[in-house]
C-alpha cells in the first residue's frame, strides 16, 4: 500500500478531499488543486459549496482568480454529499474545534466528520486531521470511529495522521503554501506517505514527528506560548499604567536585544480561533492526569479579563472629562480580532463592545473590514457607514480596538474629545493631549 500510494503521489493521480471549506480547508483545497491533484471539497453548508462551485471566493488568503480557474478547469469541485469520499485517496479534516458553554472542548464537528468519512472509507486511503485539538484525539477518537465504521484496520488498510493547520489570516508573507508543516501519523509507513503528499503540494518544509500526539501537543504549544507571553505583557501593562511608565516604550527598548527576547504587545484581549481556545484544550486534558497547568491558567485569567480592564480604563478617562460612562457615546474603531482582516471570531473588541453596553454606554463602531457582525458573545452590530470629522466630534470617547491601516488616525486625533488607544496605533502622532494609551 505504501509503495502504491507513493507512486500515485508522484504521478499525481491521487484524488484529494478536504472536509470543511473554511479559513483552513478552502486554502488547502486550492493548493492541492493547484499542485495538480483533482480535489473535492466537502462541507455541510450548502452556501459555501455553491460559492465554491460558482468560483466565488470568500476567504481572504485565497486568490480570486486561482479559485475561479480551478473550478472552470474542474480541478476543484465542492459538495455536501459525503458519499463522494469513496472517490478520494487522501482526505484532510479541517473543521472547527470550539469550546462549549463550560469552556471545555467541543469536538462534535470532528466526531461527526469522522463518522461521515468512516461510512465511505476504502482501502489504500489516507485520513489526516488538521483541526486543532487535545493530544490523543487522533488515536483515541478518530481511529476507533474509522475502524468501526468501515471494518478496515488502521495501518494495514488505511493510513491515519495529524497535521496541525498553521494559518495566520492577513499575513502577507506566510500563507498555506509556504508555511512549514508538521506531520505525525500512526506508524512509520503512514508518516512517510502522508508527509510525501504534503511535500507534493506545499513549498514549506515538512517536519515529521513520531506520533499524532506529538503533533497535537506541538500545535497546542505554539499557541499556548503566545497566550502566556501576551498574558505577561498585559499584566505588565497594568502595572506600568499604575507606575506612570509606558509599557510600549519598555517593550521597544527590550526588543533591541538581539537574543533571548521576542516582543509581544498588550491589547484589549485575545481573539481568533486558536490562541484564546487552545490552552483550554490542554488544561482540560491535563486534568485527566491529575495535573494542573498553573502558569497557563494564570495567563488565561489575565487575558480573559483584559476587555473588562479596558472598559474600566475607559470609565476613568470619561470621568476625567466629567462624563459618566452611563449614557456616554463611545465609538470603537475596529471589531475584527486583528488588523486589516474581516475575521471577528472570538474578537476581544466585541467583548469590549458588550461590556461597554453593560455599563450603560451608547456604543457604535467603525470597521471598514467588518460592516456587520452577528452572534458573537451574544452580540450583533453594524458599522457606521463612514468616519468623518463630524462623526468623530459627536462622540465622548473614541476607542481604538483594532489597528487597521486604512483609518485616518490623524483626522481622528484632530477631532476627538478623548481617545483610548488600546493598540498604540497612534504612536507617531505628535499632539497627544487627547490620547491615552493602554
Image (cartoon, rainbow, N blue to C red):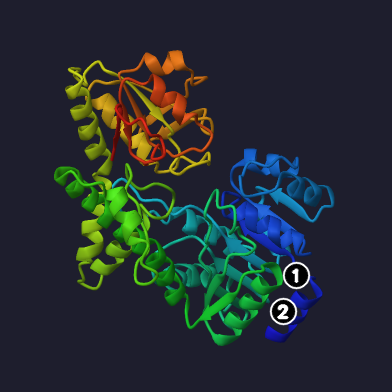
In-image side of 16 versus 235 (left or right): right
- Describe the element under mark 2 as helix, strand or loop: helix
Say if 423 sits above or below 124 in the image.
above
Q: Which mark is residue 14?
A: 1
Q: Which mark is residue 150?
A: none
Q: Earlier in the sequence, mark 2 or mark 1?
A: 2
Residue situated furthest right in the rendering: 73
User: What residue is shown at x 19% (from left), y 43% (from top)?
Assistant: 241
In-image side of 14 versus 221 (left or right): right
In-image side of 141 versus 417 (left or right): right
Picture quarter containing residue 268?
Answer: top left
Q: Which mark is residue 5?
A: 2
Closest to the observer: 397 or 195? 397
Residue situated furthest left in the rendering: 243
- Describe the element under mark 1 as helix, strand or loop: loop
Q: Are marks 2 and 1 in contact (CB under 8 Å)?
A: yes
User: What residue is shown at x 52% (from left), y 54% (from top)?
Assistant: 168
- Whether residue 291 can be seen here: yes
Q: Percent position (x, y) of residue 437?
A: 30, 38
User: What residue is shown at x 31% (from left), y 50% (from top)?
Assistant: 249
Q: Percent position (x, y) of residue 386?
A: 52, 20
Closest to the observer: 150 or 292? 292
In-image side of 122 versus 291 (left or right): right
Amino acid at each position: 500500500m505504501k509503495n502504491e500510494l507513493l507512486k500515485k503521489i508522484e504521478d499525481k493521480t491521487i484524488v484529494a478531499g478536504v472536509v470543511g471549506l473554511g479559513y483552513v480547508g478552502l486554502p488547502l483545497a486550492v493548493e492541492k488543486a493547484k499542485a495538480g491533484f483533482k480535489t473535492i471539497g466537502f462541507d455541510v453548508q450548502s452556501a459555501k459549496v455553491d460559492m465554491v462551485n460558482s468560483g466565488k471566493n470568500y476567504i481572504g488568503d485565497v486568490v480570486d482568480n486561482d479559485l475561479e480557474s480551478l473550478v472552470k478547469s474542474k480541478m476543484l469541485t465542492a459538495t455536501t454529499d459525503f458519499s463522494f469520499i469513496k472517490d478520494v485517496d487522501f482526505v484532510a479534516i479541517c473543521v472547527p474545534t470550539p469550546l462549549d458553554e463550560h469552556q471545555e472542548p467541543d469536538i462534535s464537528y470532528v466526531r461527526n466528520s469522522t463518522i461521515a468519512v468512516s461510512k465511505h472509507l476504502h482501502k489504500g486511503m489516507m485520513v489526516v486531521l488538521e483541526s486543532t485539538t487535545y493530544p490523543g484525539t487522533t488515536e483515541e477518537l478518530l481511529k476507533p470511529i474509522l475502524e468501526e465504521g468501515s471494518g478496515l484496520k488502521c495501518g494495514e488498510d488505511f493510513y491515519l495522521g495529524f497535521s496541525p493547520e498553521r494559518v495566520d489570516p492577513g499575513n502577507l508573507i506566510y500563507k498555506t503554501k509556504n508555511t512549514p508543516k508538521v506531520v505525525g501519523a500512526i506508524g512509520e509507513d503512514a508518516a512517510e506517505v502522508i508527509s510525501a503528499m504534503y511535500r507534493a503540494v506545499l513549498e514549506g518544509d515538512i517536519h515529521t514527528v513520531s506520533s499524532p500526539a506529538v503533533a497535537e501537543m506541538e500545535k497546542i504549544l505554539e499557541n499556548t506560548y503566545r497566550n502566556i507571553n501576551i498574558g505577561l505583557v498585559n499584566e505588565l501593562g497594568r502595572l506600568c499604567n499604575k507606575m506612570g511608565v509606558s509599557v510600549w516604550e519598555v517593550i521597544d527598548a527590550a526588543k533591541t536585544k538581539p537574543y533571548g527576547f521576542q516582543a509581544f504587545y498588550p491589547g484589549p484581549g485575545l481573539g481568533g480561533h486558536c490562541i484564546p481556545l487552545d490552552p483550554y484544550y490542554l488544561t482540560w486534558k491535563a486534568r485527566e492526569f491529575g495535573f494542573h497547568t498553573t502558569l497557563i491558567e494564570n495567563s488565561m485569567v489575565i487575558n480573559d479579563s483584559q476587555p473588562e480592564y479596558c472598559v474600566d480604563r475607559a470609565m476613568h478617562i470619561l470621568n476625567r472629562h466629567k462624563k459618566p460612562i452611563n449614557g456616554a457615546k463611545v465609538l470603537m474603531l475596529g471589531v475584527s480580532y486583528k488588523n486589516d482582516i474581516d475575521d471577528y471570531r472570538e474578537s476581544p473588541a466585541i467583548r469590549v463592545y458588550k461590556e461597554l453596553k453593560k455599563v450603560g454606554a451608547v456604543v457604535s463602531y467603525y470597521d471598514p473590514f467588518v460592516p456587520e457582525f452577528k452572534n458573537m458573545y451574544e452580540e450583533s452590530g453594524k458599522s457606521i457607514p463612514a468616519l468623518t470629522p463630524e462623526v468623530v466630534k459627536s462622540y465622548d470617547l473614541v476607542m481604538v480596538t483594532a489597528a487597521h491601516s486604512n483609518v485616518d488616525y490623524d483626522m481622528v486625533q484632530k477631532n476627538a474629545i478623548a481617545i483610548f488607544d488600546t493598540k498604540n496605533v497612534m504612536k507617531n502622532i505628535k499632539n497627544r493631549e487627547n490620547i491615552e494609551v493602554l
